[in-house]
Image: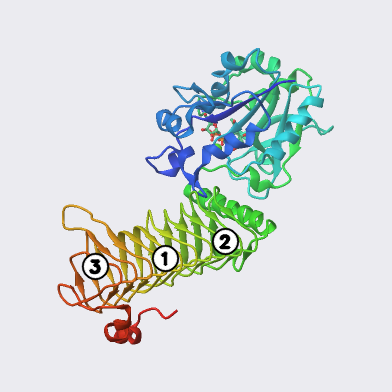
């Protein structure tokens, strides 16, 4: 039997009070509609049918071409929404699964149980129910003495006895396709909202003496529908716990899962420890045996094995194996910290490579720069990369030693093993092995690496990074 999937996403979501269509609001960094689409994908080899209305164009742009779109121009109710998909799905599927785009916590396993139950059901549909103390606007499931489901009653039209029912309609169904398509256009218009309620099909099936089955959700939070920003925050918290549990089960230590925020796409290697108040976002990949946090934000970055990020912000950057950053540093897009390199306190690196084993311990800025292996960037070194109109590059050779408070006025190149005295303003290229100092910097005639003590002794005391 072939299953088709319909996801309803046409509603306005007025209660979000937002300019963004409700189903595009992100959860753990992903628009919520994508969760609903993912949940049905494993159950069908047909593309899911997404019913769009409000914000249809924005939804299409976000979701792309992996689903079939059906437009519901006027929102005349869930029954009317499903009717719009009839031409698309009729003759293609024997079973039709119906879910909502604003129910991002539903798991594929739960949908699987629903579909499996309907396969065995002699009647035309099976619905997902939940038992909850807080009925919060859900339709009530009415059963007869034999336990058969005979009706779903919406809050607006329920009697006081019906309002007291705690078995609720999740709004997720699996239908026999033929029965659905021959009945969905016969739903009567409901007052007072003047809508066609999909739920009326339950009463119609019962009236025909047909069996309607109910599958209770094991975890009622799965059926949490998002109507307000309060619901959004509740769903975010549940999803956060799920994601964190997943990574802990995969071998990641979390000192405080409650303050660890990991977005859906992030990858983390085993034996890595995440410290409190840490946010991992976007397409971030973290290796094994790392120490990340506390108080750190890592976004769209790749971090190798055995790295350390302490109280820092890492965005669009690469950290190679064994490198470390922080506290209080900022790696910006295009930063590359090579194997074993060190960025200490209050550093900023943008579009620049810090070579293997290079050190930048304190208060420095590297922008549009290439630093060779083993170089030492003294405290307060600045690449002056912007002349007010254009960016220029700085190159620092292997094992160069840049004294504290050096201004490197780009474009400029510092040779391999060159030594720059503290406080220099370097405006011209410095040859390999040379010693340069002053404002503007001049090369000392017989300058050699031996003179390093002379120019750099102060610097060692005031903060050049000691190896
Ligand atoms: C619906 C059910 C209710 C169930 C609840 C669970 C009906 C009549 N009631 O109520 O029994 O407990 O879901 O959340 O079905 N939509 C469209 N087009 C429309 C109307 C709605 O696409 O014309 C979409 C909405 O975007 C939303 C979903 O269908 O994602 C549910 O619609 P909504 O009006 O919120 O139904 P509920 O009142 O929640
Ligand atoms: Ca709703």
Query: Residue visible at 61% across and 32% down?
Result: 99
Mark 3 and mark 1 in contact (Cβ < 8 Å)? no
Q: Nearer the viewer, mark 1 or mark 3?
A: 3
Q: Which residue is mark 3?
A: 430
Answer above or below: position of 246 versus 439: above
Q: Is residue 194 left or right of residue 333?
A: right
Q: Position of residue 17 (x, y in %)?
A: 40, 43
> N-terminal of the two: label 1 or label 2?
2
Picture quadrant of residue 245: bottom right
C-alpha distance separating marks 2 and 3: 36 Å
Is label 3 within 8 A of ligand 1 (CB to nearest ligand atom)? no
Q: Which residue is mark 1?
A: 373
Q: Position of residue 34 (x, y in %)?
A: 54, 38
Looking at the picture, tell me which residue is in the foreground, 433 or 258.
433
Mark 3 burial class by Cα count in 10 Å: few <14, some 14-19, many 20+: many
Q: Which residue is mark 2?
A: 305
Judged from the image, the quadrant occupied by ligand 2 is: top right
Label 3 residue SS: loop
How many numbered tags mark residues here? 3
For the C terminus, which image quadrant? Answer: bottom left
Looking at the picture, tell me which residue is in the foreground, 402 or 318.
402
> N-terminal of the two: label 1 or label 3?
1
């Amino acid at each position: 039997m072939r299953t088709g999937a319909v996801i309803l996403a046409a509603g306005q979501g007025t209660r979000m009070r937002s300019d963004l269509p409700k189903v595009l609001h992100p959860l753990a960094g992903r628009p919520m509609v994508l969760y609903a689409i993912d949940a049905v994908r494993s159950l069908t080899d047909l593309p899911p049918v997404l019913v769009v209305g409000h914000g249809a164009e924005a939804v299409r742009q976000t979701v792309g071409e992996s689903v079939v779109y059906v437009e519901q121009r006027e929102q005349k109710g869930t029954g009317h929404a499903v009717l719009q998909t009839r031409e698309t799905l009729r003759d293609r599927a024997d079973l039709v699964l119906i879910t909502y785009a604003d129910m991002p916590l539903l798991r594929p396993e739960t949908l699987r149980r629903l579909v499996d139950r309907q396969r065995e059901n002699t009647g035309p549909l099976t619905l997902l129910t939940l038992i909850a103390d807080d009925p919060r606007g859900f339709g009530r499931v009415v059963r007869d003495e034999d336990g058969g489901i005979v009706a779903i009653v919406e809050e607006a039209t329920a009697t006081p006895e019906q309002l007291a029912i705690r078995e609720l309609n999740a709004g997720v169904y699996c239908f026999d396709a033929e029965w659905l398509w021959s009945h969905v256009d016969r739903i009567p218009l409901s007052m007072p909202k003047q809508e066609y309620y999909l739920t009326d099909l339950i009463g119609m099936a019962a009236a025909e003496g047909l069996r309607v089955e109910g599958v209770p959700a094991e975890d009622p939070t799965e059926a949490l529908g998002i109507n307000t920003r309060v619901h959004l925050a509740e769903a975010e918290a549940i999803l956060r716990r799920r994601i964190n549990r997943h990574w802990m089960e995969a071998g990641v230590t979390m000192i405080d899962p409650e303050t660890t925020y990991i977005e859906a796409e992030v990858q983390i290697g085993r034996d890595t420890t995440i410290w409190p108040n840490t946010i991992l976002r976007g397409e971030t990949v973290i290796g094994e045996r790392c120490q990340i946090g506390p108080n750190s934000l890592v976004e769209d970055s790749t971090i190798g094995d055995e790295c350390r990020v302490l109280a820092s912000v890492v965005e669009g950057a690469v950290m190679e194996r064994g490198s470390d950053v922080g506290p209080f540093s900022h790696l910006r897009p295009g930063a590359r910290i090579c194997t074993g390199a060190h960025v200490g306190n209050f550093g900023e690196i943008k579009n620049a490579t810090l070579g293997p084993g290079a050190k930048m311990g304190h208060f420095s800025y590297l922008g549009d720069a290439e630093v060779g292996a083993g170089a030492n960037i003294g405290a307060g070194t600045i690449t002056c990369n912007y002349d007010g109109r254009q960016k220029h590059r700085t190159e620092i050779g292997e094992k160069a030693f840049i004294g504290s408070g050096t201004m490197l006025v780009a474009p400029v190149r510092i040779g391999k093993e060159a030594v720059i005295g503290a406080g220099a303003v370097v405006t011209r290229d410095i040859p390999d092995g040379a010693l340069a100092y002053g404002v503007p910097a001049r090369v000392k005639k017989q300058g050699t690496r031996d003179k390093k003590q002379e120019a750099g002794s102060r610097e060692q005391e005031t903060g050049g990074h000691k190896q």
